[in-house]
Amino acid sequence: MADAKKPRAPFAPWDRRELPGLFSVEESARRVGAYKWCELKLFEALGGWIATVPELDVKMRLGAHCYKHAWHAELWHKRLPELREMNPDRLSVAPNEDMVNFIEALTEPEAPELTIEKLVGVYRVFIPHFISAYTFHLNNTSDITDAPTMRSLRFILQDEFEDWRDGEMLIQSLIETPAEVDRAAAHQARLEKILLAAGGITGSGTIGFNTLKHEGALA
Amino acid sequence: MRKFFPVEDLARDERFNQITMNDRMADQRTAITTDSRPSRAANRIVPSRGDASDAARGLMHGIFVGEIQALEGAGRTCWDFTTGEEAPFELKLDMARQCWDEARHVEISIKLSDWMGSEIGEYAENTVLFQAACSSDPVLRLAGVNRALEGLAIDVFTTMKEFGEVAGDQYLEFAEDWMLADEVTHVKMGSDWLRKITENDPERRKKALDFQSVVDKLFSYGGTRSESQESPIGLARRFRELAGFDDQEIDVIADLSLAALEERKAAVLEAQAAHN
Ligand SMILES: [Fe+2]
Ligand SMILES: [Fe+2]
């Protein structure tokens, strides 16, 4: 039997968690606020589109995915006060005007024959950008100080990967002609250009390049 | 995408046929008659009823299209209102949760319809449920859809669950029981939000409750749902209590439904007399 009095190292040899992380409390909160705003805009759009798509399988998928992004928004909403933001609405904002423009362009398609455009915007543009923003945060924050954010990020990333696969398969099943391939690609390019201007889900520096613009972000 | 989506534009594939409430009542296959022979004195959907499986299939298709519209309505409430100003963030979270639940109900309904031997589009789709979800006040939507229509869903699922029980159909009983659990949650969402949002606004609460009773009456379908055995669908008191209805509210719906049944019977007798 082990000696109960024998001192042990507080960090076991296999525990590689480290200080510091890339983000200050303020920067972490700013990012989380942008996540919440983007997840909110996404679940609202998915909800709105349900009535506009004639494909029954797509209709049902959008319903299931709408909830998942609402749950993500809720997790971020609850995280904000823990990051010293007692008025979560203050930080639940778009990172910049270009992101507002992106949401406007994303949610533009309404007609029943535009299911490809609706899905491309979500699953080939928006969700891949969520995956990269969340992965960047997960890989760069301190796994000691920001562990609660990381726990949410892992749950959310699992959803994002699953939904991305669902959406991509729906898109592939809907595209039947070379002209539709072009349609999908053109819409994707149009939206990507707006997101390029926005700099990603949290604005410039979302995945580390050009991070210097934001106060609190380490170079 | 527009805010506020007109019912005529609901997107469907070619299998679906949409009709109005009036067309629906004129359908000969509608589940109620005034046939006074002893065997028809009870219209309740029970296995001993001669046309039970046909009536149950028709009802199941009605549930299926109702679930689609409930899904669409909850989704529109996520989109149509500005978060924080026109609808609280938490209310929208509830509506998104309802989207997921209704999407599963559509899935369950398709499996059940298959099991019962009917096909998508075999019966017409009455779009009145979505119409109740078109109000410009989210509280009215919650009163009309979550409390009135989903309250009806509680009644329908309870009747169908009992039908499955009596008929020894465990597949049906299992599925209805699970949907019933979700619907109780949705009705409760309606009750809770109605009380919370209109706490200091008695006028808005009255407007919402008035709208609910209009929808309740409309959906009493001329007596299709009441506590009388003459109605195909019963009134599920216990589950309604779980969902936040008080005794008095349930009594009002019970009275309204019975009155609708009597009205409908009188109208049919009148039509028959005119015909003879
Ligand atoms: Fe439902
Ligand atoms: Fe429901």
Image: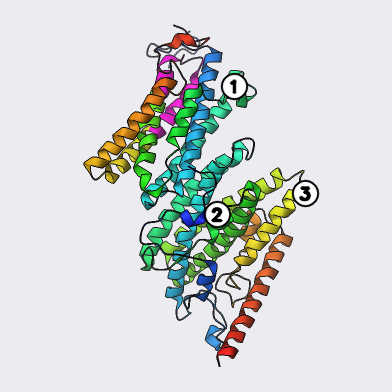
Q: State which mark lies toward you, 3 or 1.
A: 3
Span of residues in magenta: A133-160
Circle 1 sits on which residue?
A82
Circle 3 sits on which residue?
B202
Chain under numbered label 3: B
Give me the C-alpha separation between circle 1 and circle 2.
34 Å
- Give amino acid for label 2: Glu
Q: Is residue B40 above or below residue B188?
A: below
Q: In the rendered view of the protein, which quadrant contains the C terminus of chain B?
A: bottom right
Circle 2 sits on which residue?
B183
Q: Nearer the viewer, residue A210 or A187?
A: A187
- Residue A24 percent across, percent down from the top left: 52, 11
Q: Is residue B214 magenta?
A: no
Chain under numbered label 1: A
Q: Secondary structure at mark 2?
A: helix
Q: State which mark lies toward you, 2 or 3.
A: 3
- Residue A208 percent across, percent down from the top left: 40, 13
- Give amino acid for label 3: Pro
- Give amino acid for label 1: Glu
Label 3: how many Cα within 10 Å (few below 14, some 14–19, many 20+): few
Q: Is residue A170 above or below residue B28?
A: above
Give me the C-alpha separation between circle 2 and circle 3.
27 Å
Residue shown at 40%/33% (left/top)? A160
- Quadrant of res B147: bottom right
- Quadrant of res A199: top left
